[in-house]
Amino acid sequence: MLNYIWGGMILVSLIVSALTGNVETTVAAAAQGAGNAVELCLTLLGILCLWTGLARIGERAGFIRILSRLLHPVLSFLFPKLDRNDPARDSIVMNFVANLLGMGNAATPLGIKAMQDLHARNKKRGVATNEMCTFVVMNTASLQLLPTTLISLRQAYGSAAPSSIIIPVWMVSICSLAVGILASKFIERRTRL
């Protein structure tokens, strides 16, 4: 469906540019946009490699196990069916830390790993468990203490104060995470009744 929407938008823009006599401008803008997209991907790739490498080092050094123990009360509330030694807990902690540090796209592979670990213990294939739903909500509405990817993007595009967004990001992250978790727990409780 999304392919049809994008295809339709491209087709409409080409028709409008042909009717208004701006085909050359449209083609030049498309080429410039493609170049900017490649440049942005290379910038984000560097950030992704850095954070993914640091996450792997943290995992091998035992940092994730220490964080898992420190976050035990929070994880027990959010994921009551996971025991302390479940591999899904480590994956969730790694994703949580990646989001906390604002790693952006570097958090995605960690989130996929966490979801695979949660799915591996799922007895009803094709049906998401409460833990899986809570994780998706927590991952989507992630708390970011240091939005490094966003700051890097703002700096790459010439912002005079790239880190001036930290306080608003904190406020929005806390609100969205709180509302998401409350909604998840409310729905989880209602479905148990």
Image (cartoon, rainbow, N blue to C red):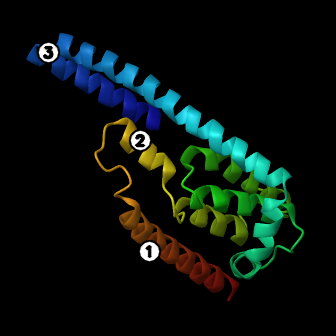
Q: CA gap, disc 1 to disc 2?
A: 23 Å
- Asked if residue 144 lies left or right of residue 30, the reply is right
Q: Quadrant of residue 16?
A: top left
**For the point 34% across and 36% down, which residue is it?**
157
- Asked if residue 71 lies left or right of residue 148, the reply is right
Mark 1 vs 2, N-terminal side: 2
Mark 3 surroundings within 10 Å by alpha-carbon count, few (fewer than 14), some (14 through 19), many (20 or more) = some
Mark 3 vs 1, N-terminal side: 3
Q: CA gap, disc 3 to disc 1?
A: 44 Å
**For the point 37% across and 44% down, which residue is it?**
154
Return the residue found at the far right: 85
The amino acid pointed to by label 1 is: Cys
Relative to 38, residue 141 above or below: below
Q: Secondary structure at mark 1?
A: helix
Front in this rendered view, residue 8 or 115:
115
Relative to 192, residue 174 above or below: above
Q: CA gap, disc 3 to disc 2?
A: 31 Å
| Residue marked by disc 1 | 175
- Asked if residue 1 lies left or right of residue 56, the reply is left
Return the residue found at the far top: 24
* Residue 48 x %, y %: 60, 39
Q: Is residue 58 visible?
A: yes
| Residue marked by disc 2 | 153
Return the residue found at the far bottom: 193
In this rendering, which labeled residue sits more in front, label 1 or label 2? 2
In this rendering, which labeled residue sits more in front, label 3 or label 2? 2
